Amino acid sequence: MEFLTELWQFLRVRKKFWLAPIILLMAAFGGLLVAAQGSAVAPFIYTLF
């Protein structure tokens, strides 16, 4: 959790708010990849793409 607070502080101090959506999208795709590794959710994820 400390990593997220440090990341948010970096974005706020350096005025790099445009990076926040990119980081969120990368985290969402990473979550989808983890969920699709062999679960019952995989067929539903494949229909999204």
Image: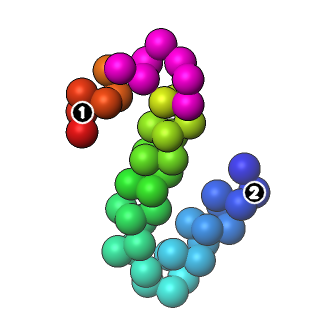
Question: Which amino acid lies under the numbered mark 2 shown in the image of this protein?
Answer: Glu
Residue 2's tag is 2
Residues at circles 1 and 2 in contact by the CB criterion of under 8 Å: no
First-in-chain label (1 vs 2): 2
Q: Residue at x 75, y 57 (%)?
A: 2
Looking at the picture, tell me which residue is in the foreground, 2 or 23: 23
Residue 10's tag is none
Q: Quadrant of residue 21?
A: bottom left
Q: Position of residue 1 (x, y in %)?
A: 72, 50
Question: Which amino acid lies under the numbered mark 1 shown in the image of this protein?
Answer: Leu
Is residue 42 in the magenta section? yes
The relative height of residue 31 versus residue 7 in the rendered view (above or below) is above
Q: Give the residues in magenta.
A: 37-43
Q: Residues within 10 Å of mark 1 (few under 14, many from 20)?
A: few
Q: Position of residue 16 (x, y in %)?
A: 43, 80
Is residue 12 in the magenta section? no
- Spatial CA distance of label 1 from label 2 is 33 Å
The relative height of residue 35 versus residue 5 in the rendered view (above or below) is above
Disc 1 target residue: 48
Q: Residue furthest right?
A: 2
